[in-house]
Image (cartoon, rainbow, N blue to C red):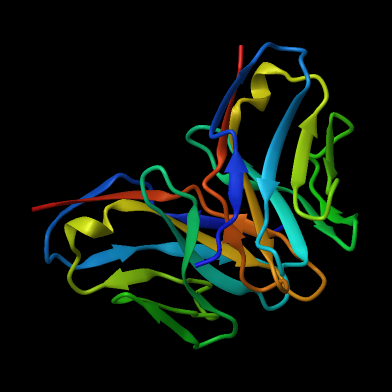
Amino acid sequence: GNSVTQMEGPVTLSEEAFLTINCTYTATGYPSLFWYVQYPGEGLQLLLKATKADDKGSNKGFEATYRKETTSFHLEKGSVQVSDSAVYFCALRAGAGSYQLTFGKGTKLSVIP
Amino acid sequence: EPEVTQTPSHQVTQMGQEVILRCVPISNHLYFYWYRQILGQKVEFLVSFYNNEISEKSEIFDDQFSVERPDGSNFTLKIRSTKLEDSAMYFCASSEETRSYTFGSGTRLTVV
């Protein structure tokens, strides 16, 4: 079946540090890949997505590249801010005919001044 | 920006009681979903709904669960006889098509 594995948290970084949150997946076919973010007290918000191999999704300084050869979709940001403190979820949608998202467990990021 | 609204934000119920979680999807969206997240665990898909019927459901979505779009604006999840293990955060989502969802803020259900 489909699955998503992301690095365990929590992750604590100082402001302006470089962020990487690893995500690998197992899926049949050609999944679409997503990163969602959940700020305290809020719902899941789409951060970025990529729908085919070698696509790079980007938003708000975050980037992730769809790597089919390593089945990975690692999230990166060059310089984190305190306002980036949240829980980050990697997810996949398996492909045509399937509506559901399969999520990783989430990684809590805390950025300290 | 349009939002998916979920009510209540927190519900406490006795084991064995029926509970209805409510969601107001974005008005022009056609696809509706429920997910749940047990504390410390993954966000799990429960069910998707399109054209007034269930289009996909997971193994979790057994006979104790049902969904309904009673009036063209609300989308509800009913749990007939709650169990302790139903305690979780329940997220509603909607989408125009199947690619990008908008999620609500969730309802935290506590079964005691």
Where B83 falls versus B8 (above or below)?
above
Residue in view at x 50 percent, y 88 percent: A54
Q: Position of residue A89 (x, y in %)?
A: 47, 56
Where A20 falls versus A43 (above or below)?
below
Question: Is residue A104 shown left or right of residue A39?
Answer: right
Residue in view at x 55 percent, y 44 percent: B42
Where B12 falls versus B77 (above or below)?
above
Question: Is residue A67 shown left or right of residue B99?
Answer: left
Q: Is residue A38 visible?
A: yes
Q: Residue furthest left?
A: A113
Question: Is residue A23 shown left or right of residue A113?
Answer: right
Q: Position of residue A30 (x, y in %)?
A: 68, 78
Q: Is residue B60 visible?
A: no
Q: Residue furthest bottom?
A: A54
Residue B106 found in image quarter: top right
**Circle count:** 0
Residue in view at x 39 percent, y 63 percent: A22
The quarter in which the C terminus of chain B is drawn is top right
Question: Is residue A87 shown left or right of residue B70?
Answer: left
Choose between B27 and A36: the one closer to the eye. B27
Q: Position of residue B89 (x, y in %)?
A: 57, 36
Choose between A94 and A81: the one closer to the eye. A81
Residue in view at x 53 percent, y 38 percent: B41
Q: Position of residue A9 (x, y in %)?
A: 33, 46
